[in-house]
Image: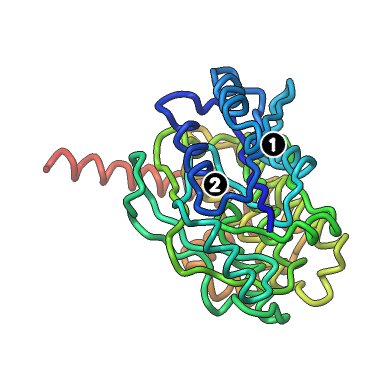
């Protein structure tokens, strides 16, 4: 069972990050794999490092690049074009996997007949194979033959895509791909892809290493990144329409959309932006009214959204200005109390 592992790469040359990632793949106990490294128009030495690996391991490593940055989704799509394996895996170029990661995932697939298999991951801040803080990914309730109820659970909480392998035939037959040129591509693809697979299994071990460092994720909140999350969810909505999933999963689609398009974006924007804009906040509300005007009645929204957030959202439904002013004052008061507490310490 040949495995294709797609590695999007953008400016990962420093501190040996890219080398450690690639070495973890070359040292896998399962050797029938190809490494598809896609340079996403890096401006450092990443492409040179990739070409060095390709020269040293021509039967294992294939390198691709293009002139314009398409972000991680675009790089993954490029890798999908060239993948020849029966199985597809994704690995972020600043992370790495345990030596027996793919052997265990593929063995689980062979034993169960699953078409998607995952594992847990762990958080580390140094290049090591010592397990750090373990983060369970997906639950046992989501595994097995994907009935409608289990599909609903996966749609709501799909888990990370990089800790899974996918049967390539399902991806190809359904022309599954990622949004390009934006952050948060997994917000769209994770839930949407889950609806096309028929059996999900899991290895309950932390086989994936997520490297925590300043450049490893998007730390600063910007309006542009919030726009990307909005766009990712618009594409998710369109994908659900195209796939005909609203008939069986409308309630779940509505909540997933509201959670990411509106709730998370609204509060991360208000909390993280130094100078938030009323027009952006107003646009978010109007977007929800256009897509799902009654989302506040959604049973998942009622159960999972905390009470304070629900009160704030209800306030915005009455007045964008009242919400905006109240939330800004709330943050200001909190900041003053924090400074006073620190000065007394």
Q: Is residue 225 left or right of residue 344?
A: right
Residue at 65 percent of width and 78 percent of height: 150
Mark 2 lies on a secondary structure that is helix
Q: Is residue 183 above or below residue 305?
A: above
Which disc is residue 96 wearing? none
Labelled disc at residue 324: 2
Q: What residue is at 37 percent from the left and 60 percent from the top?
A: 134
Q: Position of residue 182 (x, y in %)?
A: 68, 38
Identified at 61% across, 41% down, the residue is: 226
How would you rate the neighbour count of disc 2 (Cα within 10 Å): few for under 14, some for 14-19, many for 20 or more? many
Q: Count residues near mark 1 (Cα–Cα under 10 Å), then give few for <14, some for 14-19, many for 20+.
A: many
Q: Is residue 56 above or below residue 253?
A: above
**Is residue 325 positioned above or below 17 on the image?**
below
> Could you tell me if residue 279 is visible in this image?
no
The reply to whether residue 59 is in sight is yes
Which mark's residue is nearer the viewer, 2 or 1?
A: 1
Closest to the observer, 48 or 324: 48
Question: In the drawing, does residue 11 fall left or right of residue 17?
Answer: right
Q: Is residue 145 left or right of residue 271?
A: right
Q: Position of residue 153 (x, y in %)?
A: 62, 74
Q: Place residue 34 in its image quadrant.
A: top right
The Cα–Cα distance between marks 2 and 1, rounded to whole angstroms, is 38 Å
Q: Position of residue 156 (x, y in %)?
A: 63, 68
Q: Nearer the viewer, residue 280 or 12?
A: 12
Residue on which disc 1 sits: 75
């Amino acid at each position: 069972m040949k495995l294709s592992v797609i590695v999007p790469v953008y400016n990962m040359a420093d501190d040996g990050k890219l080398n450690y990632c690639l070495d973890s793949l070359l040292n896998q106990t399962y050797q029938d794999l190809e490494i598809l490294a896609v340079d996403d128009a890096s401006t450092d030495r990443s492409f040179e490092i990739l070409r060095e690996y390709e020269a040293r391991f021509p039967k294992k490593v294939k390198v691709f690049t293009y002139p314009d940055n398409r972000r991680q989704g675009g790089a993954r799509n490029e890798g999908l074009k060239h993948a020849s394996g029966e199985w597809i895996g994704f690995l972020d170029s600043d992370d790495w996997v345990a030596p027996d990661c793919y052997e265990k995932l593929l063995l689980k697939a062979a034993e169960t007949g699953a078409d998607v298999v995952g594992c847990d991951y762990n958080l580390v801040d140094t290049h090591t194979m010592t397990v750090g803080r373990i983060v369970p990914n997906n639950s046992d309730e989501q595994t097995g033959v994907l009935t409608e109820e289990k599909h609903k659970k996966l749609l709501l909480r799909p888990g990370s895509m990089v800790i899974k392998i996918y049967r390539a035939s399902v991806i190809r037959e359904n022309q599954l791909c990622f949004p390009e040129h934006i952050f948060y591509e997994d917000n769209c693809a994770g839930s949407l892809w889950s609806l096309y697979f028929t059996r999900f299994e899991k290895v309950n071990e932390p086989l994936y290493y997520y490297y925590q460092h300043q450049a490893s994720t998007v730390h600063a909140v910007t309006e542009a990144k919030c726009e990307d999350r909005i766009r990712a969810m618009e594409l998710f909505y369109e994908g659900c329409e195209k796939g005909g999933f609203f008939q069986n999963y409308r309630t779940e689609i509505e909540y997933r959309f509201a959670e990411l398009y509106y709730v998370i974006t609204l509060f991360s924007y208000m909390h993280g932006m130094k100078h938030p804009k009323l027009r952006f906040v107003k646009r978010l509300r109007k977007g929800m009214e256009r897509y799902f005007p009654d989302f506040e009645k959604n049973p998942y929204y009622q159960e999972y959204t905390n009470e304070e957030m629900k009160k704030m959202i209800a306030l915005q439904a009455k007045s964008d200005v009242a919400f905006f002013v109240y939330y800004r004052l709330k943050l200001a008061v909190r900041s003053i109390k924090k400074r006073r507490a620190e000065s007394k310490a």
